[in-house]
Amino acid sequence: MISASRAVVVAVAFSAIACVTATSDATVTETVPDRTSFPAVSDLLDHRCGTLDCHGVTYRNLRIYGREGLRFAATDRPTSKPSTTTVAEYDATFASLVALEPETMSAVVADQGAAPERLTFVRKARGTEDHKGLAIWSEGGPEDLCVTTWLAGKIDAAACAKALTVR
């Protein structure tokens, strides 16, 4: 049996170890997918997921901005002619997507897109995890290929273009 004074010493020692923090100049580097090729993926997400009753709203953890739904600037209107998704909207959607599960996203990208189902947004889109919008595409379909090839670092632009015509 441990004496009360010895128990206090042990507790203080464990507390000191538990409170060790990283230095203020410590950094963590995450690997994210290519931002340059992201507009094709963002256009797909805006078209399939960015409606104002789904991820085109500010209270969702995944916010999708674009010409078909939530606009980044108050002066932009959905589907007004001519309407294009702005660079700021692509940036905001990219930031929202890669921030959902940064460690998992980094691992998938570092593994060149292997096992993308590790990402919640992929599972939900495929319908393998509960999703209010149900399955919005099938594994291996053009929408899925658009996203998974982007995660792998070699986007299939043809699949992305085809995905915009599928509904």
Image (cartoon, rainbow, N blue to C red):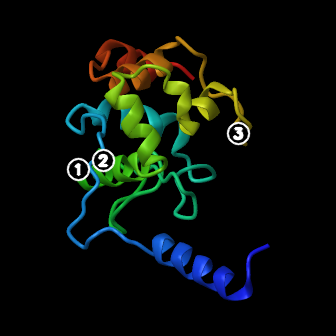
| Viewer can see residue 165 | no
Q: Nearer the viewer, mark 3 or mark 1?
A: 3
Q: Position of residue 21 (x, y in %)?
A: 37, 71
154 versus 53 height, above or below: above
88 versus 161 height, above or below: below
Q: Are marks 3 and 1 in contact (CB under 8 Å)?
A: no
The first of marks 3 and 1 along the sequence is 1
Checking the image for residue 7, the label placed there is none
Q: State the residue in front, 32 or 41.
A: 32
Q: Is residue 82 left or right of residue 68?
A: left
C-alpha gap between disc 1 and disc 2: 5 Å
Q: Position of residue 118 (x, y in %)?
A: 54, 31
Task: List the residue tagged with mark 1.
Answer: 87
| Residue for point 39% across, 14% down | 159
| Residue for point 49% across, 25% down | 116
- Which quadrant, please, contains the C terminus? top right
Task: List the residue tagged with mark 2.
Answer: 90
C-alpha gap between disc 3 and disc 2: 24 Å
Local secondary structure at mark 3: loop
Task: List the residue tagged with mark 3.
Answer: 131
27 versus 79 height, above or below: below
| Viewer can see residue 41 | yes
